[in-house]
Amino acid sequence: MMKEKHTILGVHITDRVKEAVAVQRLLTQFGEQIKTRLGLHEVGSATSPNGLLLLEMVGPDAGIQELSDKLNAIDGVEVQSMVFFHLAD
């Protein structure tokens, strides 16, 4: 039996206003490899500068690594990944 892989990228953004354009540009560029995108940030009377994106990735590992590397190259952005395997039918 084959194993299927799920890769999740956690993208921590420390200044959403400053980094939003550069991050969004990369998400658009790699959009075909992003299966699910979830954005988390503080809500309240003032806009929180911090944000967290969770990206469920598909496709070649090289593309996932390239996106991760390019996001990490942006000041104020940190990427961590989680990889899960399960048996496929």
Image (spheres, rainbow, N blue to C red):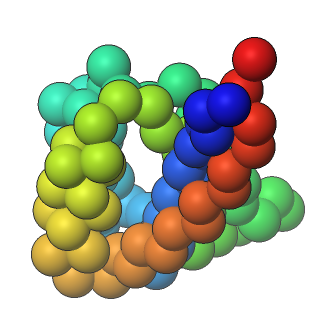
Q: Residue 82 in the image: state x and y as whole percent.
A: 60, 65
- Residue 88: image quadrant is top right
- Residue 70: image quadrant is bottom left
In this view, the residue farthest toward the front is 1
Q: Quadrant of the N terminus?
A: top right
Q: Residue at x 84, y 62 (%)?
A: 44
Camera-nearest residue between 47 and 56: 56
Q: Quadrant of the C terminus?
A: top right
Camera-nearest residue between 68 and 13: 68
Q: Residue 7 in the image: state x and y as whole percent.
A: 54, 50
Report whether 69 appears left or right of 88: left
Against 20, is 38 above or below? above
Report whether 64 appears left or right of 3: left
Q: Can the viewer see residue 82?
A: yes
Report whether 16 appears left or right of 72: right
Q: Residue at x 53, y 25 (%)?
A: 35
Against 21, is 33 above or below? above
Q: Can the viewer see residue 47?
A: no
In this view, the residue farthest toward the right is 44
Q: How many marks?
A: 0
Camera-nearest residue between 5 and 63: 5
Q: Residue 40 in the image: state x and y as whole percent.
A: 71, 54
Q: Residue at x 21, y 43 (%)?
A: 63
Q: Residue 8 in the image: state x and y as whole percent.
A: 58, 53
- Residue 46: image quadrant is bottom right
Report whether 80 appears left or right of 4: left
